Amino acid sequence: MLVGVVDGELRVANTGAPLDAAGVAALASLRASAKRDDEGSVGRFGVGFAAVLAVSREPRVVTRDGRGVRFSASATAEAVAGLPGPAAELARRAGQLPVLRLAWPVAEEPPPAGFDTEVRLPLSTVVEPPELTGLGVDDLLLALPDLVEITVGAERVTRVDEGDGRVRVGDRVWLLARATGTLDDDEAGTQAVEQRGRRDWSLTWALPLDVHGAPDPAGADVLHAPTPSTERLSLPARLIATVPLEPDRRRVRDTAAARRVLAAAGPAYLDLVRAVPGVDRVRLVPAPGFPQSPTDALLRDTVVDALRDGEWLPGADGRELVARRAEWLDLPDGGPLATLLTGVADLADLADPAALTGVPVGVLDQLGVRRLGPAALADRLLPVERPAAWWHAVYDALAPAADAVPGLLDELRALPVPLADGRTIAGPRSVVIPVDDTADLLAGLDLPGLHLADPAAAHPLLERLGATTAEPSSLLGLPALRDAVDRSVDDAEAGLDTMPLARVVLRLLTAGVGRRAGALALPDENGDPARADELLLPDAALRPLLAPDAPVGVLHPDVADGFPREALVAAGVLDGFALVVDDEPLGPDHDLHDEDLWWDSLDAPPARVAAVRDLDLVDDDAWAGALALLGADRDTRAAVLTDGHTRWWLRRNVVLGGRAPGYWRLPSAGDLAALYEPVHGVDEALLRAV
């Protein structure tokens, strides 16, 4: 197309089929091109020849052979004046001449070389070509695939097809998506009378691209049909469509034909979105907000519906997802985690976080994309079977978010942890993370509540979520292990094998770690289970001092020979006297002999109890040796010398040589030599205490 001003005339030349008789009849009767139903032609928009009256009252159309027709306001007025009927009608219309009803033949110089037809419009006022650049040449070049160039004066705008739906118009590149169709009889019948013969419709979505080829979503715009209307739109791309307009070509005419064309805009928009790289697609979703016009509301609905139900949303696994069935991971920097989750069956519809960066939640909500929060993610991961190293990578991906999102740790309390025995447990709170060789030490222990994490999955995040780091020195303090020790006798009497537990405890005590485990079940000399602190070593120093009927068993010799003496004593097995210590006593409930009598004898409850137990089991003839044994140990000696239950009880119950302590004197009490016999072989400090 060539546009210019020559000798006071606006001239528009183009290529294509030259004007013929049918064309003249169409111009004179419909003021539209006979080619209006041809896909790709300007005439199909129905805006053609009638528009010339805006600038000229004497238009002419000339073909390449120099022949043509002219329309003329003056000639029409002269012809009508000689006809009484038409003259009266013209008078009734107050001079509104039907300029384009009558045509006269003309013969003039042909159009410029290379062009087939030229429209020549004598101008009533001087119009410079730059004023014509607002005629929407970009829209025409975008909407008409066969139109490749428009020249206006010294300006030339060309259209270059760059492939893959990309078109360069002037200095700007657009991505296009087209749709065409045919109206049925009912739909076509709702159009204006002169347009009812038109059945074909088309629309073009045009998305501007930046200099790097990335989408540059449009701002506020209007519907183009193809020239701009006044129907305001708020969509990211420009819509050029053969939508029926009102006679003033400002507003869409609400007809079945219009609704048919606009309904097709949604699927076409989906095609446009799918032609964009995945990381840019969500940017093309219309942002939630109030529509700018009734047409905008209709278009937004059909576009969002198409995007909600179409396959286009980039998935974390590289697939294109249906938006309403997809989920988005509500975690910052979720890309690495989403990649790890690829292939997890229950998370197959997880959207690619890179494609959602910076997207408002409202956009995802209107698409029906569901939020997948940390708590729900933890639940979904429970059935997942993956190597421990995979779980470690998951924890590593979650760790940064734990620092950035307040309350995230609470939502991850049920995060699964793989165990050393191959199982997976929900929540790290009951999990023990092995350190050094504790994994080998605890392996094989089937204890309720003792969940040993697979060492390859160990991660600081698990500790933040409540997991316990199992240093060898703290193993015996683990609640599960401590509970197992406390009920071990009951378990053994019920027929359970408690020796694996005993071996673990004794190995820890052999290494010099842990604390006293007096409730540990160990076999006595008959193989029956008993508490460790109710058993004597076979060669215990205390054993010959006890009464024959003392209810204290002897450790099985195999166990005594299988573990170091120090470990067995640390477990509570008796070699000498044992001490009961309570730093916050609440009452006489320590199973000490006559403890209630001692408690009642005090002016105030004791602040601390540190007493020797089993004194009532000592044989009456063995007290000299018993006192010597008490004095040989620092802790039991201190209990005797301190004012407490031990001293109180010994003063009332010790028998030396068959007599009460008051029958004897200290060896150093020489002044009493004539009255009392001395006691030998016992520390005088102990004798004085008792």
Image (cartoon, rainbow, N blue to C red):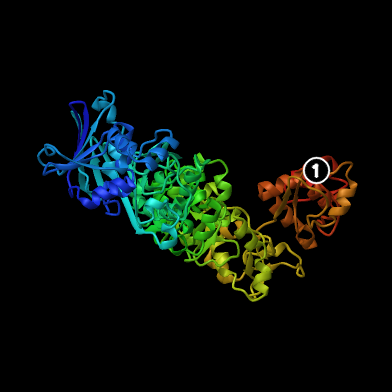
Q: Is residue 180 above or below residue 409?
A: below
Q: Position of residue 20 (x, y in %)?
A: 19, 50
Q: Position of residue 578 (x, y in %)?
A: 70, 55
Q: Is residue 546 above or below residue 581?
A: below
Q: Is residue 124 above or below residue 360?
A: above
Residue 26 visible in rendering: yes
In the displayed structure image, the side of residue 686 where residue 354 appears, left or right: left
In the displayed structure image, the side of residue 436 where residue 555 appears, left or right: right
Of residues 154 and 547, which is closer to you in this image? 154
The residue indicated by pointer 1 is: 643
Of residues 148 and 117, which is closer to you in this image? 117
In the displayed structure image, the side of residue 44 where residue 408 appears, left or right: right
Amino acid type for the residue under numbered disc 1: Asp
Crowding around mark 1 (Cα neighbors within 10 Å: few <14, some 14 to 19, many 20+) is few
Instruction: Provide the secondary structure element on which disc 1 rests.
Output: loop
Of residues 248 and 365, which is closer to you in this image? 248
Of residues 107 and 592, which is closer to you in this image? 107
Q: Position of residue 311 (x, y in %)?
A: 40, 58
Quadrant housing residue 159? top left
Q: Position of residue 516 (x, y in %)?
A: 63, 55
Residue 458 visible in rendering: no
Specify the quadrant that holds the N terminus.
top left
